[in-house]
Image (cartoon, rainbow, N blue to C red):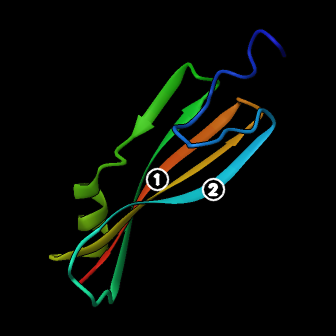
Amino acid sequence: MLVLGGCAFVKAPVNGFIYTELERPVAATSVAKSTRTGRSCAESYLGWVALGDASIDAAKRAGQIQEVSSVDHESFSVLGIYARFCTIVRGT
């Protein structure tokens, strides 16, 4: 477990070795109204394989958003076996 575990970590301001789950702000704009939310994610398995598109553009497409009011990031990992990094876009 020590050789294989602990490899799949996500970008986060703080990381837990056993478990990480947090959301943090990235940016906000002057668009005050947000009626839609879009999410895009990338995942990692054992730190060996990473797949996905966690871009802002992918999140905008998923939420059918034209004007962005805020962007947040969400990080999740368990024992370095599985990790997920998501971008959450809110807007209209």
Q: Identify the residue at image location x=65%, y=21%.
A: 7
Q: Residues within 10 Å of mark 2 (few under 14, many from 20)?
A: few
Counting from the top left corner in percent of width and height, residue 51 is at 43, 35
Q: Residues within 10 Å of mark 1 (few under 14, many from 20)?
A: many
Is there a contact, CB below 8 Å, between mark 2 and mark 1?
no
- Amino acid type at circle 1 is Cys
Give the number of callouts.
2
Q: Identify the residue at image location x=33%, y=71%.
A: 70
In the figure, is residue 59 to the left or right of 47?
left
As helix, strand or loop, the secondary structure at mark 1 comes to strand
As helix, strand or loop, the secondary structure at mark 2 comes to strand
Residue 22, disc = 2
Counting from the top left corner in percent of width and height, residue 75 is at 57, 49
Q: Report which residue position mark 1 lands on.
A: 86
In the figure, is residue 53 to the left or right of 78?
left
Residue 90 position by quadrant: bottom left
Counting from the top left corner in percent of width and height, residue 72 is at 42, 62
In the figure, is residue 62 to the left or right of 49?
left
Q: CA distance from mark 2 to mark 1?
A: 11 Å
Question: Which quadrant, please, contains the C terminus?
Answer: bottom left
Q: Is residue 8 above or below residue 74?
A: above
